[in-house]
């Protein structure tokens, strides 16, 4: 099949060697020993050698048993020369090499588009990675800050709780002391009144008119109480006011925490 004057071929005998090249002109694969001409031989300009292929038979036209070197753009298929003058006559046909050149340009444009898209997507991925890193940094800082803030709040609440407790106990002591002091005075007044009531009772039963008249002026004037219960006094008001104030603070804090929970849930 080869022009031996241009390319002396060594036929493999004995153990078969691995093919290193395939000829698209004659659809034959060659081992290294068969490729004897120098690499700059004119034969390489005539016969196109490519990497070894097991699918060389696919380049043969099944109808004419000829190498398919042409391409029918009308039917979008590879054909041989005889096909181009018979069933593909009048079709838009070019050489397979020309079609390959044209499609190679289209392929390069597609590759450029794909590579540009790859670069765009890689840029997007990098930006997303940076965004994730920023989110992680921000979240870590927020967690750290929230822990500090809640620790400060806890310490503040504990201090305020201790202060309020101390104030409540102090007010309790004041109110209890005032109440007990007033209670003692009232009890003393009750004792005095009972004694005077007994004197008056005894006087009311005397039969001595002169004695009655002489004692009457000294018993008619009772000493008025220096202290009395103030109907407007509300010793429990202080405690009620403190409880109401703390309830208001609790409700406000509860509202803030609910907003924080809603923010966390994305509402």
Image (tube, grey):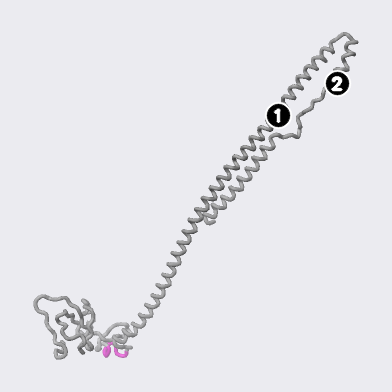
For the N terminus, give its image quadrant: bottom left
Q: In this view, does 199 lie above or below 126?
A: above
First to last magenta residue range: 84-90
Local secondary structure at mark 2 = loop
Kindly tell me whether residue 66 is visible in this rendering.
Answer: no
Left/right of residue 132 with respect to residue 242 in the rendered view: left
From mark 1 to mark 2, how far is it between C-alphas?
Answer: 28 Å
Closer to the camera in the image, 3 or 185: 185
Residue 211 appears in which quarter of the rendering? Answer: top right
Kindly tell me whether residue 123 is visible in this rendering.
Answer: yes
Q: Residue at x 52, y 56 (%)?
A: 266
Identify the disc placed on residue 221: 2
Q: Principal SS element in the magenta part?
A: loop
Q: Earlier in the sequence, mark 1 or mark 2?
A: 1
Q: Measured from the top left, where is residue 169 in percent x and y?
A: 63, 34
Q: Are marks 1 and 2 in contact (CB under 8 Å)?
A: no
Q: Measured from the top left, where is residue 47 in percent x and y?
A: 21, 86
Residue holding disc 1: 179
Q: Measured from the top left, where is residue 197 in percent x and y?
A: 80, 17
Residue 59 appears in which quarter of the rendering? Answer: bottom left
For the C terminus, give its image quadrant: bottom right
Local secondary structure at mark 1 = helix
Closer to the camera in the image, 259 or 86: 259
Q: Residues within 10 Å of mark 2 (few under 14, many from 20)?
A: few
């Amino acid at each position: 099949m080869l022009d031996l004057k241009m390319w002396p071929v060594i036929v493999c005998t004995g153990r078969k060697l691995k093919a290193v090249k395939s000829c698209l002109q004659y659809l034959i694969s060659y081992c290294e020993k068969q490729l004897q001409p120098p690499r700059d031989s004119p034969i390489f300009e005539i016969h196109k050698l490519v990497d070894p292929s097991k699918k060389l038979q696919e380049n043969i036209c099944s109808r004419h048993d000829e190498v398919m070197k042409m391409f029918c753009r009308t039917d979008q298929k590879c054909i041989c020369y005889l096909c181009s003058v018979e069933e593909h006559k009048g079709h838009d046909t070019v050489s397979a090499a020309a079609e390959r050149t044209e499609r190679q340009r289209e392929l390069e444009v597609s590759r450029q588009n794909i590579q540009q898209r790859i670069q765009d997507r890689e840029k997007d991925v990098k930006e997303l990675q940076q965004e994730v890193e920023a989110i992680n940094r921000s979240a870590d800082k927020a967690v750290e800050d929230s822990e500090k803030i809640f620790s400060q709040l806890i310490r503040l609440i504990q201090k305020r709780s201790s202060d309020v407790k101390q104030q409540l106990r102090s007010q309790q002591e004041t109110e209890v002391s005032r109440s007990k002091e007033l209670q003692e005075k009232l009890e003393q007044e009750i004792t005095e009144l009972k004694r005077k009531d007994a004197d008056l009772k005894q006087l009311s039963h005397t039969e001595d008119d002169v004695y009655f008249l002489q004692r009457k002026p000294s018993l008619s004037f009772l000493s008025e109480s220096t202290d009395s219960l103030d109907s407007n006094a509300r010793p429990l008001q202080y405690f009620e006011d403190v409880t109401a104030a703390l309830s208001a603070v609790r409700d406000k804090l509860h509202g803030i925490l609910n907003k924080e929970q809603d923010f966390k849930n994305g509402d």
